């Protein structure tokens, strides 16, 4: 009984790590996209 609980906790921890990593990657990707958009705006104005 205890082993299954430990395995579940471990799985949950791993899942949380994966989600955090994905969120961080998504934020980075969005920053890159927004930065590119800003550059395009600057080029058009300039």
Image: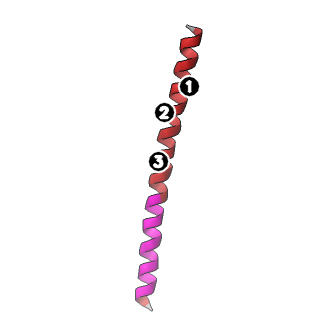
Q: Which of 13 and 22 is in front in this view?
A: 22
Q: Compare marks 1 and 2 and give the one earlier in the sequence.
A: 2
Image point (44%, 72%), residue name? 11
- Is residue 43 toward the left or the right of residue 17 in the image? right
- Specify the label residue 24 is tagged with: 3
Which sits in the foreground, 17 or 41?
Answer: 41
Can you say whether 40 is above or below 23 in the image? above
- What is the C-alpha distance between the residues marked 2 and 3? 12 Å
**Which numbered disc covers residue 32?**
2
Colour setting: secondary structure
User: Contact (CB < 8 A) between labels 1 and 2?
Assistant: no
**Residue at (50, 50) in percent of width and height:** 23
Give the answer, above or below, for where 31 lies relative to 18: above
Q: Do the residues labelled 2 and 3 touch (CB within 8 Å)?
A: no
* Alpha carbons under labels 1 and 2: distance apart: 9 Å
Q: What element carries label 3?
A: helix
Question: Is-magenta flag for residue 23?
Answer: no
Residue 46 image label: none
Where the C terminus falls, by quadrant?
top right
Residue 19 percent across, percent down from the top left: 49, 58
Q: Where does label 1 land, which residue?
A: 37
Sequence-first disc among 2 and 3: 3
The quadrant in which residue 6 appears is: bottom left
Cα separation between marks 3 and 1: 20 Å
Around disc 2, counting alpha carbons within 10 Å, would you say few (fewer than 14), some (14 to 19), or many (20 or more)? few
Q: Nearer the viewer, mark 2 or mark 3?
A: 2
Judge whether 40 appears above or below 29 on screen. Answer: above
The residue drawn where x is 56% and y is 25% is 37
**Residue closer to the observer: 13 or 45:** 45
The residue segment tinted magenta is 3-18
Q: Is mark 2 on a helix, strand or loop?
A: helix
């Amino acid at each position: 009984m205890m082993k299954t609980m430990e395995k579940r906790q471990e799985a949950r921890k791993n899942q949380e790590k994966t989600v955090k990593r994905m969120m961080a990657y998504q934020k980075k990707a969005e920053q890159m996209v927004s930065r590119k958009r800003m550059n395009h705006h600057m080029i058009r104005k300039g």
